[in-house]
């Protein structure tokens, strides 16, 4: 069988071209497979490089868990640590800073006292208050009172008797127990000093039958005060407590068996309001 050598040579060249094209397609397929197998981070970096954005690649040692710690100069760029728990879970006290300040108040109270006379004695009291407000249970305060009470006329034997109590009072309150919002309960220890003036009238038409006496008044006590502040400057209060008089005089009237003695324990209650500043 005879073949033309030129034809054979052309066929050999064609086979060589076919083999070269096959090798090129194989290389292209391998490159495509490598591109598809690349990590998403690598593809993102490649896209950023095409857009002209500089890409900072961490050292290979960073990718090795057993490698050395990252350079402190680049730690801010490649810090992959989880955010602190305080960022994910806000603090319970994030509603506002705790308030700590001195406050002063002036106010007035109306009350009824039950120790200085046979019946309840209505009283009007003025007070001045200084309070170190902390927003916590320990919020000490100091209050000074000036009060005047006058009892109704009581019939003791055949005499009509009345009592007037003028006194000053000091309340020491170390804590304030918060309830809800701006409301709270303040327990206090208190002490009163004053003058109790007693009058007796046997015959309204005869001045000689009128007698009066003035005696000292001294008593410690305990009280509880409920307060609420609807505004930052207005304070509304209700309070009550018990007194333990240390001077317990006995008042005798005609006939001799008609007497009144200051009790060992007395109570009081009242309500009022004050203006706070600053």
Image (cartoon, helix red, strand yellow):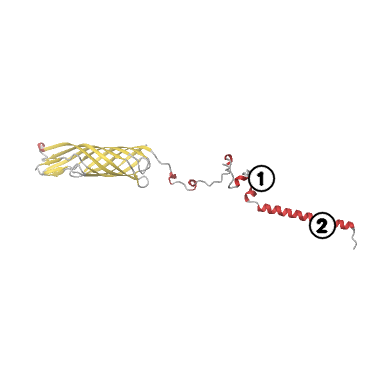
Q: Position of residue 39 (x, y in %)?
A: 63, 51
Quadrant in which residue 147 is drawn: top left
> x%, y% of residue 152?
18, 43
Task: Give the mark count.
Answer: 2
Counting residues from the start of the chain, the first of labels 2 and 1 encountered is 2
The 10 Å Cα crowd at callout 1, few under 14, some 14 to 19, many 20 or more, is: few
- Mark carried by residue 277: none
Q: Quadrant of the N terminus?
A: bottom right
Comparing 56 with 178, the one in front is 56
Residue reaching furthest left? Answer: 255
Q: CA distance from mark 2 to mark 1?
A: 41 Å
Residue 25: quadrant of the picture: bottom right
Residue at which label 1 appears: 49
- Residue 247, percent across and down? 18, 39
Q: Quadrant of the C terminus?
A: top left
Hey, which quadrant is residue 160 in on the image?
top left
Closer-to-camera residue (159/96): 96
Task: Using the image, determine if residue 169 lies above or below residue 18.
Answer: above
Q: Which residue is denoted by mark 2 in the rendering?
A: 15
Q: Secondary structure at mark 1?
A: helix
In the image, farthest residue toward the bottom: 1
Q: Would you place residue 49 above or below residue 5 in this image?
A: above
Question: Mark 2: which secondary structure?
Answer: helix
Single out the mark in the foreground, 2 or 1. 2
266 or 91: nearer the eye? 91
Which percent across, then down, holds residue 221?
25, 42
Q: Is residue 70 left or right of residue 260?
A: right
């Amino acid at each position: 069988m005879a073949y033309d050598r030129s034809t054979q040579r052309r066929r050999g060249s064609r086979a060589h071209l076919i083999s070269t094209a096959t090798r090129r397609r194989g290389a292209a397929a391998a490159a495509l497979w490598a591109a598809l197998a690349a990590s998403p981070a690598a593809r993102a970096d490649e896209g950023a490089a095409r857009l002209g954005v500089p890409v900072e690649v961490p050292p290979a040692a960073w990718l090795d868990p057993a490698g050395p710690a990252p350079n402190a100069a680049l730690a801010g760029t490649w810090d992959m640590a989880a955010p602190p728990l305080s960022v994910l879970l806000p603090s319970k006290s994030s509603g506002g800073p705790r308030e700590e300040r001195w406050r002063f108040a002036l106010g007035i109270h109306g009350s009824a006292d039950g120790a200085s006379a046979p019946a309840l004695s209505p009283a009007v009291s003025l007070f001045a208050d200084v309070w170190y407000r902390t927003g916590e249970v320990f919020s000490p305060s100091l209050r000074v009172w000036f009060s005047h009470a006058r009892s109704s006329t009581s019939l003791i034997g055949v005499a009509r008797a009345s009592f007037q109590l003028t006194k000053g009072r000091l309340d020491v309150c170390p804590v304030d127990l918060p309830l809800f919002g701006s409301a709270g309960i303040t327990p206090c220890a208190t002490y009163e000093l004053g003058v109790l003036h007693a009058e007796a009238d046997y015959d309204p038409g005869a001045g000689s039958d009128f007698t009066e006496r003035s005696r000292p008044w001294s008593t410690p006590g305990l009280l509880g005060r409920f307060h609420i502040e609807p505004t930052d400057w207005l304070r509304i209060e209700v309070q009550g407590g018990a007194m333990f008089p240390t001077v317990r005089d006995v008042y005798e009237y005609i006939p001799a068996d008609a007497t009144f003695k200051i009790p060992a324990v007395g109570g009081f209650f009242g309500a009022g309001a004050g203006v706070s500043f600053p």
